[in-house]
């Protein structure tokens, strides 16, 4: 599903590491990369839509890193509002996914988790892959996540119609390679205690049946290593805790839903899971 990706770069040292990571993704099907850099005309009023030579030079350096791994690469520089330009560029180029670097301490100052990526997600039907670039000791050293992106996936579900597209993508990924999948649903403690605490056992049984149905669908699709987990607690904290305590290569979930997913990714605590995740996160919006 990642054959053609739009890679967002701010030309910083962390973005060099992001480029190196994407260069390694040929083993999961990446063949073509659109290397995109957005210049805000408000920040560069004197440029008059001319791209500075130092920016072109840096983009060419990052392009060579990707090409040396056998990928087809093109460079796109746009002027304007980053979120709008990225959305338009992704749709114009018909990419499979948008790749953005993430870090809780904000080392990606323009394209990291925040207004740019949240606005992109809210206005596009294209999946977004967030890659954590972790600081190690100093600002000059960065740690990349595991390159085996699809080896062991944690799939979070709320069973919503909006989240069905992420399940479809999960099946596609599983049909293309051997992998391990854990399907996780977190019973939101606040909702349970507020609305149906007296029926918690009945609700848990119903949810477990839905989890088994999803596992059955993946089994029928040819996946051989599928597990189901039903947890009780606060979704954000529970997901992060599981990612920190178990060795997953990717978190996959819908970017919109009927319950906690909608609140996590489109509400006041937007992207806290992505910011804190130690592994890459693939968010799949519903089809529009």
Image (spheres, rainbow, N blue to C red):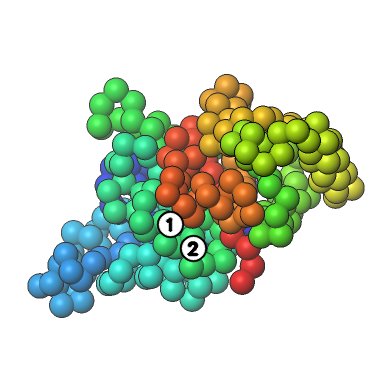
Crowd tier of the residue under label 2, counting other residues whose Cα lies within 10 Å: few below 14, some 14–19, many 20 or above: some
Circle 2 sits in a helix, a strand or a loop, which is it?
helix
Q: Quadrant of the N terminus?
A: bottom right
Q: Is residue 80 above or below residue 286?
A: below
Residue at x 57%, y 66% (from the top left corner): 125
Residue at x 67%, y 36% (from the top left corner): 192
Res 198 seen here: yes
Residue at x 30%, y 69% (from the top left corner): 81
Crowd tier of the residue under label 1, counting other residues whose Cα lies within 10 Å: few below 14, some 14–19, many 20 or above: some
Q: Which residue is mark 2?
A: 122
Give residue 193's position: percent from left, percent from top.
64, 34
Q: Is residue 224 above or below residue 79?
A: above
Asked if disc 1 and disc 2 are in contact, CB closer than 8 Å, the reply is yes
Q: CA distance from mark 1 to mark 2?
A: 6 Å
Give the residue furthest to the left: 46
Q: Which residue is mark 1?
A: 118
Near-viewer residue (51 or 108): 108
Near-viewer residue (158 or 174): 158
Q: Is residue 51 above or below residue 198?
A: below
Q: Quadrant of the C terminus?
A: bottom right
What label sits on residue 147 in the rendered view?
none
Near-viewer residue (156 or 143): 156
């Amino acid at each position: 599903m990642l054959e053609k990706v739009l890679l967002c770069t701010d030309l910083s040292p962390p973005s060099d590491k992001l480029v190196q990571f994407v260069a390694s993704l040929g083993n999961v099907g990446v063949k073509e990369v659109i290397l995109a850099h957005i210049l805000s005309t408000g920040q560069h009023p004197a440029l008059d839509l001319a791209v500075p030579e130092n920016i072109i030079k840096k983009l060419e350096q990052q392009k060579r890193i990707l090409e040396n791994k056998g990928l087809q690469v093109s460079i796109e520089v746009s002027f304007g509002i980053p979120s709008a330009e990225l959305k338009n560029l992704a749709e114009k180029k018909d990419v499979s996914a948008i790749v953005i670097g993430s870090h809780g301490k904000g080392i990606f100052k323009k394209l990291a988790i925040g207004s740019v990526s949240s606005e992109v997600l809210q206005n596009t039907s294209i999946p977004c892959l967030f890659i954590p670039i972790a600081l190690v000791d100093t600002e000059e050293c960065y740690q990349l996540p595991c390159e085996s992106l699809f080896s062991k996936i944690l799939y979070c579900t709320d069973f919503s119609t909006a989240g069905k597209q992420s399940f479809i993508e999960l099946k596609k990924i599983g049909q293309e390679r051997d992998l391990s999948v854990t399907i996780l649903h977190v019973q939101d403690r606040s909702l349970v205690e507020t609305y149906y605490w007296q029926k918690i056992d009945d609700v848990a049984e119903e949810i477990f049946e839905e989890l088994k149905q999803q596992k059955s669908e993946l089994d029928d699709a040819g996946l051989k290593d599928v597990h189901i987990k039903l947890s009780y607690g606060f979704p954000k904290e529970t997901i992060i805790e599981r990612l920190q305590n178990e060795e997953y290569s990717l978190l996959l979930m819908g970017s919109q839903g009927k319950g906690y997913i909608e609140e996590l990714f489109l509400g006041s605590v937007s992207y806290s899971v992505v910011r804190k995740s130690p592994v890459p996160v693939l968010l799949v919006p519903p089809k529009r």
